[in-house]
Image (spheres, rainbow, N blue to C red):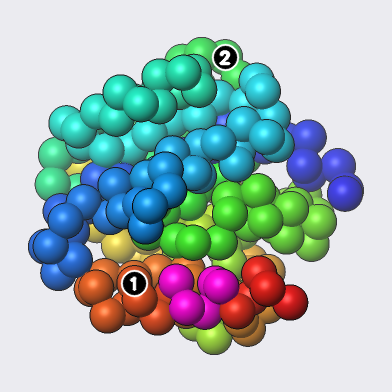
């Protein structure tokens, strides 16, 4: 692993969506196992006992995660979508004096373990870009590394009405890291049908 791995100073799990199309909170999906968000946090804790983990869930709180020493944060700006959660974490790490490294951002509606995303991103890049995004069959702007130095510019963008991650990146240096093609169905789901496909694809991927 190259030196950029040492600059990942925190993790942000995005869990603030309304899950209207799913019909239930995606973070709480379980399939007779711990809830998805609990599996994500446990996976990250296996990666690091001390890495700060921020749960960006709006007003929701997942008390079962308290044993993992996570911090729930509310959105920096209301009704600003995922950027509101990312911004709050970037500002939180700055307030905590954690340095100018990267925040690993992952959405809760992903079956690929966050540690796998972390390893792929940190093994494949060098210093220079402010943002590094995951690219499978399509670009996944909510899976990536975001420099803590982006906080001020992101706040200006959000407060001016900006809501798009890619719109924000129009004026920033960013790059992509290619994910294995079998990850694609597992990286995002919004409906029960998409979730079923993700579960099936992940089972095939992990049985090899």
Residue designated by label 1:
195
Task: Tell me the element at label 2.
Answer: loop
Mark 1 and mark 2: Cα distance apart in space: 38 Å
Which numbered disc, 1 or 2, marks the residue that appears first in the sequence? 2
Residue designated by label 2:
97
Residue numbers of the magenta segment: 199-203
Asked if the magenta segment contains residue 202, the reply would be: yes
- Where's residue 89, x and y in %? 42, 32
179 relative to 165, above or below: below
Task: Tell me the element at label 1.
Answer: helix
- In which quadrant of the rendered image does the C terminus lie? bottom right
Quarter of image, res 59: top left
Relative horizontal placement of residue 140, taking residue 133 as reference (left or right): left
The residue nearer to you, when weighing 190 against 153, is: 190
106 relative to 112, above or below: above
- Where's residue 150, x and y in %? 49, 41
104 relative to 90, above or below: below
154 relative to 182, above or below: above
* Residue under the image location 66 percent in, 69 percent down: 206
- Where's residue 5, x and y in %? 77, 42
* Residue under the image location 70 percent in, 36 percent down: 47
């Amino acid at each position: 692993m190259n030196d950029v791995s040492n600059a990942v100073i925190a993790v942000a799990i995005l869990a603030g969506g309304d899950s209207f199309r799913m019909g239930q909170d995606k973070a709480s999906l379980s399939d007779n196992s711990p809830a998805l968000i609990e599996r994500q946090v446990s996976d990250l804790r296996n990666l690091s006992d001390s890495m700060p983990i921020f749960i960006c869930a709006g007003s929701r709180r997942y008390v079962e995660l308290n044993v993992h020493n996570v911090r729930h944060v509310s959105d920096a700006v209301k009704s600003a979508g995922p950027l509101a959660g990312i911004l709050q974490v970037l500002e939180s790490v700055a307030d905590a004096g954690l340095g100018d490294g990267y925040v690993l951002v992952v959405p809760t509606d992903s079956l690929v373990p966050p540690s796998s995303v972390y390893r792929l991103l940190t093994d494949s890049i060098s210093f220079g870009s402010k943002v590094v995004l995951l690219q499978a069959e399509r670009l996944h702007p909510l899976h990536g590394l975001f420099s803590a130095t982006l906080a001020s510019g992101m706040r200006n963008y959000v407060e001016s009405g900006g809501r798009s991650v890619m719109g924000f990146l129009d004026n920033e240096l960013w790059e992509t890291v290619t994910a294995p093609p079998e990850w694609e169905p597992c990286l995002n789901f919004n409906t029960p049908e998409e979730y079923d496909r993700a579960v099936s694809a992940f089972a095939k991927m992990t049985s090899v």
